[in-house]
Image (cartoon, rainbow, N blue to C red):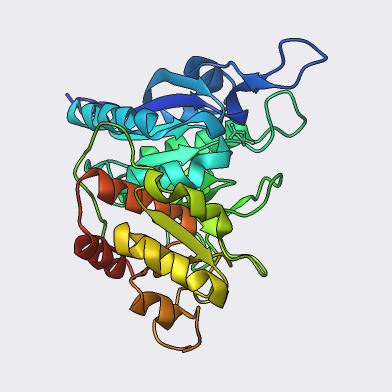
Amino acid sequence: MTVAAPQPKVAVIALGGTIAMTRSSLDTGVSPSLTADDLLASVPGLAELDLGIAARTFRTLPGASLGFDDLYELAALIESLAADGVAGVVVTQGTDTLEETAFFLDITVAAEIPVVITGAMRNPTLAGADGPANVLAAIAVAASVAARKLGCVVVMSDEIHAARYVRKVHSTSTAAFATPNAGPIGLVAENRPRLLLRPPARLVLPMASGSSPTVPVVPASLGDDFAVLRPRRDDIDGLVVAAFGVGHVPASAVDLLADYAAGVPVVLATRTGAGVVHRASYGFAGSESDLQDRGLINAGILDAYKARVLLIRLLSIGADRAEIARTFDGLG
Ligand code: ASP
């Protein structure tokens, strides 16, 4: 007699977002209301995956209103589901903050099971709503043995993206998620995930709790000397500068940034959306080498928003400036 292998079990955790938004009356906009069970009920072909699926409604929020407290609680939930033998987890949420929450989970959840985040660009009331297809593809990836030990991945439009590098690059397109520096690491076709590349070794930081450090992202812009920072002096714990090009700011901003860097970690990222911050190419006042000489920390290949998530996580575990610089350096 042969004994059937137990079905792998995938947990689907709903946080809200456009994927879960409906209209309460004809003259209002959509807002989050659907549960995880509602989302699953809308997915054609789910039964064909032959999986056990546990649905959990964790939050019913727009992506913009998620915070670090929500994410720590979510990370703990994922760890406990992994400890209970769940094969993989799908998180559904608003796409507005998805690139940041994905990276948070990537550097916070130590479990080796696939952690897959998805959402939708078109809400369920619209023609061509993309939520059901994204959920189906995300579940297929979460159940896949090949997706273990990858950290967190984002699955949108049948593409699999590494959390560390994925960006939301369009405000409305269903192809809004892209990895500008490398492209997707895989794709899903006929419910079968194909991993084409593997992201570099994971960084997983210890869990933390308590209030999150205050770390603004401030962009460089034409002729602006970062005056917005002057009154904030005492109420920030760190800063990310989204600089021009390979890491440049106006010369008039240098003293202020150097002053900040003497007190709190200041990370230098690029506002361009792709590429890296240079280390030693330019030598003018406000260049990347000038700013590093004055204590700013090079974000490497991390974009400003992911650099902020990493800086917040490092500050939350009490990392000092040297450890923060080393960690950014280690990610390239
Ligand atoms: N436009 C967003 C979304 O795609 C709204 C949100 O992030 O909640 O889900």
Relative to 284, is 122 above or below?
Answer: above
- Residue at x 50%, y 87% (from the top left corner): 284
Q: Is residue 197 visible?
A: no
In which quadrant will I find the C terminus?
Answer: bottom left
In the image, residue 98 sits, relative to residue 131, either above or below, namely below
Camera-nearest residue between 167 and 86: 167
Query: x, y percentage for residue 66?
Result: 47, 31
> Image quarter for residue 50?
top left
Quadrant housing residue 162: bottom left
Total numbered badges shown on the rendered structure = 0
Q: Residue at x 55, y 34 (%)?
A: 64
Q: Toward the viewer: 37 or 208?
A: 208
Residue 184 percent coordinates (x, y):
50, 59
Specify whether 327 is left or right of 260.
Answer: left
Which residue: 39% across, 70% down? 300
Viewer-proximal residue among 89 and 266 = 266
